[in-house]
Image: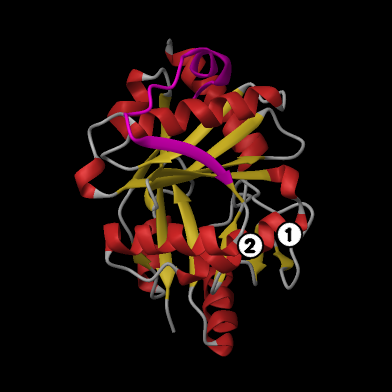
Amino acid sequence: MTDLDVTTLRNAYDRQLRIEIPDPLPAGVTVEHDGPLVRIMGLYHGGFLSYRDLGGLSGAELDALIARQVEIFRARGEAVEWKLRGHDEPADLPERLRAAGFVPEPEETVVIGPAAALAAALPVVPEGVRLREVTARADLERIAAMEEAVWNADRSQWVIGLEKEIAADPQSITVVVAEAGDEVVSAGWVRYVPGTTFATLWGGSTLAPWRRRGIYRALVTYRARLAVQRDRTLLQVDASAESRPILERLGLVPVTTTTPYVYTP
């Protein structure tokens, strides 16, 4: 792809995906606006801050905006994530977030590509593994247990959040597990973002003994088909360093980076 294509994809990403408001809102989820920021609370544990851009805020005005988020979540006793993209302005925003107590987590790469090409490929699922769409809480708990085994971190809030999303609008998200017998060995989900041309892919972690067998690729292809069935033309992924090479080989293009900055009271 040319630089122009990358720029076009990044512009589409900024225009269509940067304000991440669930629609319809799941039960217990609230959305508040603070200048250019959108503050989402109640979906997963803690809060999430998103924005298309910061409207030219800088210096003391930007510090005041950041400080308000810290005070709100300090009072709530909850963590909050500020999702910083690599092309965000002003250039000193990372330093201002760190000065306010936000801590950066590992950087990921935003990759985007056409859904149809991926959907046309046949998913090659390893022998003994099957892909299955799930909605039941018991299956979501099995996914969380697999993720906890991979990352050695609590994923119980994922069960609550995914269950809320499914209950609010079952047509807006599909969760897919890869199973070997009774064991969940990998899982991923796809969100069909309303009012956009995008479907976004999430998850994809795989238990160590089952890696390098094509399960991740099969999950991507399967979800690409689901996206095309719903008239989505573009796929977007926040790719880890491990998944980025696979996704680039499948035709997705890096357009920017994303780093979660997390404030924890």
Label 1 CA crowd tier, 10 Å (few <14, some 14–19, many 20+) = few
| SS at mark 2 in the image | helix
Question: Can see residue 203?
Answer: no
For the point 22% across and 33% down, which residue is it?
A: 212
| SS at mark 1 in the image | helix
Residue 189 is left or right of residue 230, and the answer is: left
For the point 53% across and 40% down, which residue is it?
A: 132
For the point 32% across and 68% down, which residue is it?
A: 153
163 or 209: nearer the eye? 209
Residue 92: give x, y in percent of width and height.
39, 55
Model colouring: secondary structure
Instruction: Examine the structure image and report whether residue 217 is included in the region drawn in magenta.
Output: no
Magenta span covers which residues? 112-133
For the point 65% across and 22% down, which residue is it?
A: 228
> From the viewer's perspective, is residue 93 above or below residue 66?
above
Q: CA distance from mark 2 to mark 1?
A: 6 Å
Residue placed under numbered mark 1 in the picture: 167
88 or 73: nearer the eye? 73
For the residues labelled 2 and 1, say whether their Cβ atoms are less than 8 Å apart: yes
Residue 32, quarter of picture: bottom right
Residue 156 is left or right of residue 145, and the answer is: right
Amino acid found under the numbered disc labelled 2:
Glu
Circle number at residue 163: 2
Total residue callouts:
2
